[in-house]
Image: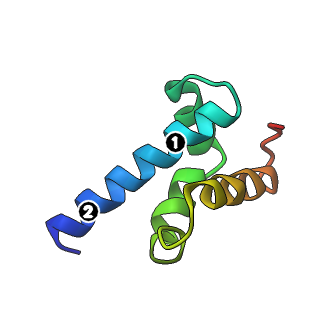
């Protein structure tokens, strides 16, 4: 993975965390902690190639579902 791809992934994950926080009325830190706890950050990194081709709203939907199946209960 080259530096540009790493930079793009990091920026994408930051945007997703921020939008996740907005949707669930969390601080960015709370959203990040939740996504780390329920493997949402790993999900975004692992499936970046697919997820970044969709809307951010779709990515947040996917994060919600993914984390829910790992014990996260936000609604």
Identified at 61% across, 41% down, the residue is 20
Image vertical order of residue 70 relative to residue 19, above or below: below
Q: Distance between the Cα atoms at labels 2 and 1? A: 17 Å
The residue singled out by tag 2 in the image is 6
Q: Secondary structure at mark 1?
A: helix
Image vertical order of residue 74 relative to residue 29, above or below: below
Identified at 69% across, 60% down, the residue is 62
Identified at 50% across, 26% down, the residue is 29
The residue carrying pointer 1 sits among few (fewer than 14), some (14 to 19) or many (20 or more) residues within 10 Å by Cα, namely: many
- Asked if labels 1 and 2 touch by Cβ distance under 8 angstroms, the answer is no
Left or right of 3? Residue 44 is: right
Q: Which mark is residue 70?
A: none
Give the mark nearest the N terminus, 2 or 1.
Answer: 2
Q: Secondary structure at mark 2?
A: helix
Q: Quadrant of the N terminus?
A: bottom left
Identified at 77% across, 57% down, the residue is 65
Image vertical order of residue 21 relative to residue 35, above or below: above
Q: Quadrant of the C terminus?
A: top right
The residue singled out by tag 1 in the image is 17
């Amino acid at each position: 993975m080259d530096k540009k791809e790493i930079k793009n992934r990091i920026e994408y994950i930051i945007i997703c965390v921020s939008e996740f926080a907005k949707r669930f009325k969390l601080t960015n830190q709370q959203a990040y902690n939740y996504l780390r706890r329920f493997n949402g950050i790993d999900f975004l990194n692992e499936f970046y190639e697919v997820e970044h081709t969709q809307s951010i709203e779709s990515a947040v939907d996917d994060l919600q579902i993914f984390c829910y199946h790992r014990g996260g209960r936000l609604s």
